[in-house]
Amino acid sequence: MPEKPAPVRPPEAEKQAITRACEAFIAVVLIPRFLPEIKPSPHGFNYPVGLRGAWHGSAYRLIQRWRTSGQHGPVEEFDSPFARLTYRGPNRFDLDWHRHTGQWWPLRQGLTLAECLAEVESNGLLHPLS
């Protein structure tokens, strides 16, 4: 398997444009589809309470926020990323999904931002858990 190129950080103006596009995607596509309302688990399991995005180095991660039921201790919240767009150059990204093992797994390389977001919308591996 060929080595991946070292990630590069996007220029600030491009980073802001990527953030705006991803935030709009989360608000218009992901939240209405995967988290239209917050429903505590009737069985005392962890349950999702939010979707957001955040930069981590040269990658923009899509993150699901979870809340514990409080049944076995204090109510706490934690984040769990589910997809990652790694910046590779002007409007070029690698798209990875977050496995249950905690590892990032490469899915597609060299996509535009629009292609990445379309893939997140259509590919079940990249969907947040519900």
Image (spheres, rainbow, N blue to C red):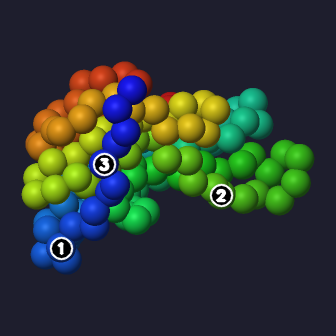
Badge 3 or badge 1: first in the primary sequence: 3
The residue type indicated by label 1 comes to Pro
Instruction: Please name the residue that numbered disc 2 is placed on.
Output: 77
Q: Which mark is residue 11?
A: 1
- Residue in front for this viewpoint, 121 or 9: 9
Q: Please tell me whether mark 3 or mark 1 is closer to you in this view.
A: 3
Foreground label between 1 and 2:
1
Pointer 3 local density, CA inside 10 Å: few below 14, some 14–19, many at least 20: few
Which residue ends up furthest to the bottom in the rendered image? 12
Which amino acid does the dot numbered 3 rest on?
Answer: Pro
For the point 18% across and 73% down, the residue is 11
Query: Residue 120 location in percent, x, y?
Result: 28, 34
Is there CB contact under 8 Å for labels 1 and 2? Answer: no
* Residue pictured at 60% horizontal, 31% vertical: 100
Q: Is residue 116 above or below residue 49?
A: above
Circle 2 residues within 10 Å: few <14, some 14–19, many ≥20? some
**If you read the primary sequence from the N terminus, does the residue marked by circle 1 or circle 2 appear first?**
1
| Nearer to us in this view, 33 or 2 | 2
Q: Is the Cβ of the residue at disc 3 closer than 8 Å to that at disc 2?
A: no
Task: Measuring from the top left, give residue 122's x and y in whole percent.
Answer: 25, 25
* Residues at marks 1 and 2, CA–CA distance in whole angstroms: 32 Å
- Name the residue at 32% across, 57% down: 7
In the image, residue 44 above or below residue 6: above
Q: Judging from the image, what secondary structure is the residue with disc 2 in?
A: strand
Observer-side mark, 3 or 2, equals 3
Query: In the rendered image, which quarter contains the N terminus?
Result: top left
Q: Residue 46: percent from the left, percent from the top?
A: 68, 41
Tell me the amino acid under the disc marked 2.
Answer: Glu
Q: Quadrant of residue 24?
A: bottom left
Residue position for label 3: 5
Could you tell me which secondary element the residue under label 1 belongs to? loop
- Classify mark 1: residues with Cα within 10 Å, few (<14), some (14-19) or many (20+): few
